[in-house]
Amino acid sequence: MARETSGKLDVPIWEKYAMTVNEASAYFHIGDKKLREIIDDDPDADYILRVGNRHMIRRKKFEAFLDRQEAV
């Protein structure tokens, strides 16, 4: 459930559609350097959302990607 703090909507990380690299790093327990490397290795992956020049991680699609991996 979202809360409003200081005029801004605060959505829990597990309910977000897309996360910043730093949020995804904390959520998935993967270093931000490794996440940026994963993004750079496949810039057209369906779990990447570009907002301007910023990369966002689509949470559910990235979870599906991780489920298919043996190691990252």
Image (cartoon, rainbow, N blue to C red):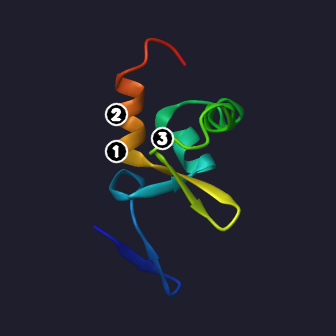
**Residue 3 in picture, x, y percent from top left:** 37, 74
Q: Is mark 3 on a helix, strand or loop?
A: helix
View extreme (front): residue: 44
Of the residues tagged 3 and 1, which is closer to the observer?
1
**Three-letter code, disc 3:** Tyr
Q: Is mark 1 on a helix, strand or loop?
A: helix
Picture residue at 36% right of the left edge, 21% below the top:
68
Q: How far apart are marks 3 and 1 (CA)?
A: 12 Å
**Three-letter code, disc 2:** Ala
Vertical comparison of 55 with 63: above or below: below
Residue that badge 2 annotates: 64
The quarter of the picture where residue 35 lies is top right
Residue that badge 3 annotates: 27
Quarter of the image where the N terminus is located = bottom left
Vertical comparison of 10 with 66: above or below: below
Local crowd size for mark 2, using a 10 Å CA cut-off: few (<14), some (14–19), many (≥20):
few
The tag earlier along the polypeptide, 2 or 3, is 3
Q: How far apart are marks 1 and 2 (CA)?
A: 6 Å
Q: Distance between the residues labelled 2 and 3?
A: 14 Å
* Horizontal relation, residue 3 to residue 29: left or right: left
**Residue 5 in picture, x, y percent from top left:** 48, 79
* Horizontal relation, residue 54 to residue 19: left or right: right
Q: Which of 58 and 4 is in front in this view?
A: 58
Local crowd size for mark 1, using a 10 Å CA cut-off: few (<14), some (14–19), many (≥20):
some
* Mark 2 and mark 3 residues within 8 Å of each other at the beta carbon: no
